[in-house]
Image (cartoon, rainbow, N blue to C red):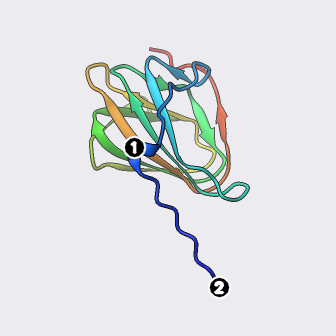
Amino acid sequence: MSTYFKVVPESSVPSPAGSAENFDGQVWQADVLRAEQPGGLRGHRFAYAPGGRSHWHVHTGEQALIVVAGRGLIQWEGLDEPRELQPGDWVHVEPGVPHWHGAADDSIFVHLAVTATGATEWGDRVER
């Protein structure tokens, strides 16, 4: 039985601008871990300039967000106001729940996103 491990050095991961179809403002997305099998685990690092944010979206599988820097915001369907996120916070994103996340207007925001399975279905821009 063989075991496979992959170490991904930070310096080896490009961080291009996120798609304007899915993000508003300046957002950079690093695809750190790509799925090794269909629908498999993926890992990304997102960096948002102040005020940058994702559009509304839904994950068909589970996802965890881990905040590593700055102040962020997250809002999901049914929540009246965005909730603030700080470094060290973890968010369990349940499948099928529309939500968005991004930087506070006066802070950068960096988070890791670990997606266990499934796809992301993108929706509308966040109304300010």
Q: In the rendered image, is residue 81 in sight?
A: no
The foreground one among 104 and 26 is: 26
* SS type, badge 2: loop
Residue 123, percent from left and from top: 64, 26
- The residue positioned 59% from the left and 33% from the top of the image is 57
Mark number displayed over residue 1:
2
Q: Say what amino acid the circle numbered 2 marks.
A: Met
Q: Are marks 1 and 2 in contact (CB under 8 Å)?
A: no
Which mark identifies residue 128?
A: none
Q: Residue furthest top?
A: 128
Q: In this rendering, is residue 68 above or below 35? A: above
Could you say where residue 60 lies in the image, as x and y percent from the top left? 66, 47
Q: Amino acid at mark 1?
A: Ser
Residue tagged by mark 1? 11
| Callout 1: SS | helix
Image quadrant holding the C terminus, namely: top left
53 is higher (above) or lower (below) than 114: above
Q: Is residue 38 left or right of residue 93?
A: right
**Placement of 65 over or under 25, stated as above or below:** below
